[in-house]
Image: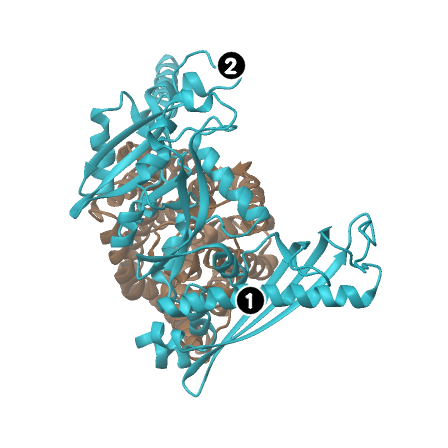
Amino acid sequence: MRKEVIGPFQLFAMIVLFELGTAVVVPIGLESGHAVWISILVALPGGILLFMLYTYLYRQFPDLVISGYTRKILGKWIGWPLSLLYLPVLTYNGGRNLREAGDLLISSSYDRTPIFIINSIMIIAVMYILYQGIEVFSRTSEIYFWLIVIMGMISNFVVIIAGLVQFKNLFPVHPGEWIEVYKSAYPNIWIFPYGELVCFTAVLPHFKTKNKIGRTGAGAITLSALMLSFTHAIEMSVLGPDIYSRTTFPMFTMITLVNVANFLQRLDALVILTLIIGVFFKMSIYCYAAVSITADLFHVKEPRKLVIPVCSVVLYSSFVSAENYPVHMNDGKVFLENILPFLCAVIPVLLFVVHLVRRRFGWYR
Amino acid sequence: MKSRLALLLAVCISCSLVLSGCWNSRELNELAIVSGIGIDSLDGKPGYRVTFQIINPSSSSQTMGSTSNQPPIVIVSATDRTIFGALRKASRRATRQLFFAHTQLVIIGESLARTGVTSIFDIFERSHELRLNSAVLVSKDTDAASVLKLLTTLETLPSMGLLKKMQNTSQVWGENRRVTVFEVINGITGASDFTINGVQIVGDVVEGQKKSSLEQSDPMVGSLMSGLGVFKEGQLIGWLNGPESRGTQWMLNKLNETNVNVDSPDTEEDIAVNIFYSKTRVKVELQDGKPVFHVHIAEEGIINETGGFVDLSKEKELEALEQGIEQKTADEVRQAFEAAQKMKTDIFNLGNELKRIHPDQWEKVKQDWSSAFAEGELDLRVEAFIRSTGMRLKPYIPAKK
């Protein structure tokens, strides 16, 4: 079988969609209050640095996913169990994204539909596209990138011309608040959404133009950071820090306020679509990463066969992970602070250091 | 091959069942669309009487002409400890499920407003059907239910009529403004207090519920936008009327357009100036522990009518008129400010402004902001410009000898 390849723009689109994913619809970095948009920008350099780390490791081992070079660098006996840790985290986090989307859809419009039905429909779409392969997936993301950009522009434009934006909700930022800005940027926003790019270690081996990787990645991350920051700034300026901090779905609340000349109103569908598209891509990449790491660890010849089992696990974990949305959010906080940084930052840094040391002293056979 | 075809068919059928989105379906003819909600207190007892104004589709459609003789709306009400409870209890009287996505108006009865409105609005935030941008009114001297029951002329739907009345008057006269649920919630959570529009009934309430009341050119009853209700800690404590309420709007920078009558050289208040632009800038700071409010108003107007002779071609005369406008505006704003100080309520968002710009100073006064506000000083500056005198310069009216 021919190796599947992705081009630079396709990777670019995938990263942007992945970053926007859920981060654009849920409130992030609550600690920094009305300056959340600055936090997002402050966390950007850290995010790019992290991605550079992943690309460095990728350049060293261009054909391997993260579990592959973990075993190369740390040896089979440490590397294998360490890579195994990625599986529960990836499936759990994929499940979390699914759960979040399901819960938000139910509380915003599908109040009578069971969450099982909504989540199953979404996961079936993910199964289908992953079964078609990463190449099909990347081409899809190319199309949806434009769709998301256009919808984002329409929603933001409409909110602005409706005269809802009040810049006094964003300024001034007082000296004491800068500390909080920094605190919520590192590690929280740095890990979610930037650190989650660790999933792309499973996608990168398919990238065909190796020398363009740095530029593509950094560009995509910067663009998505700007979009995120802008959207959250608009949300904050419309809703004010009080409502923003209490709402579960700020973007939806914001769009319901739109009323342009008693004619342009109820644009909820745009936001719901943004949510569904974002979550679809984010979850697919999580599932894909889980599939390829599993295939690598257990030497499965055809990763496709793993799509249905892995996605079923994701679907299952989306239910059993939490009883209700508040529990889900609290779990998320613990997960984000204690587990995710370990896999997104600590292990890659460890690999990087060990790899440098081993290469320096020629300890590779 | 055959089994694959069967599988494909099964997938197609199951998809068409699930993906059509019928799980959540509600048919239009099974819904009762609520256009307005009225909330009243139950004399002393905890709980609410909630009144729903439901659109009667067969008699409110305009294309068909009034086919039936029913009124365009139906009123249903229910009492319960919570608003949602009342809304579900109302099903005992309604033939269809109440549907709230098109609710444009929320009316609060005066007696409920006096006991407090803080807990009413949670359902508007939490529900995905009710909208945060529905307008809020307080019914003055009457309960909310009677306002909802009134039929209106020109507009078939009474809540639409009230809404348009409110928008119209805030657009051209400026004593009222469209206050939404969103603004009220921000007012409750913010550091300052807030105001809500008042609505009043003039005429016989009982007659106004009948369609026959509309069958004469001068309707027997009508509703009237009347002043701003002042809320302190979520409770209605008083009303601002006339110049006081317009002064409030001026201070809040919510004035679109209005009319100011200024004195001509001979007569009092006989020149009508249409103010079509007004911009208010507010700065708040503490000086020696006392808040000082720097308010700067810039306004532009057109002379629309003169009652006596004034030589509008002369720059000097115009300057005198501009000064007259400044004087009138400052008077109204001062009246509003003094009324608010007397009630010890900061309805001008000044506390929020201080908190935003000088959080350290805010810490000092936040314990007792309302008394600090009451002792605050107003530093008011008004600049008025006359941009045009209409189609004529000098009036035809001869100058007095």
Which quadrant is home to the C terminus of chain A? Answer: bottom left
**How far is the residue under mark 2 from the one under mark 1?**
50 Å
- Shade representing chain B: cyan
Q: Is residue A118 above or below residue A237?
A: above
Mark earlier in primary sequence (2, 1): 2
Asked if disc 2 and disc 1 are in contact, CB closer than 8 Å, the reply is no
Identify the chain of the residue marked 2, using the numbered disc in the image.
Answer: B
Q: Is residue A242 above or below residue B35?
A: below
Mark number displayed over residue B65: 2
- Shade representing chain A: brown
Mark number displayed over residue B261: none
In the image, B88 versus B217, the foreground residue is B217
Q: Is residue A284 above or below residue A47?
A: above
User: Is residue B229 visible to us here?
Assistant: yes
SS of the residue under disc 1: helix
Mark number displayed over residue B331: 1
Q: Residue furthest front?
A: B401
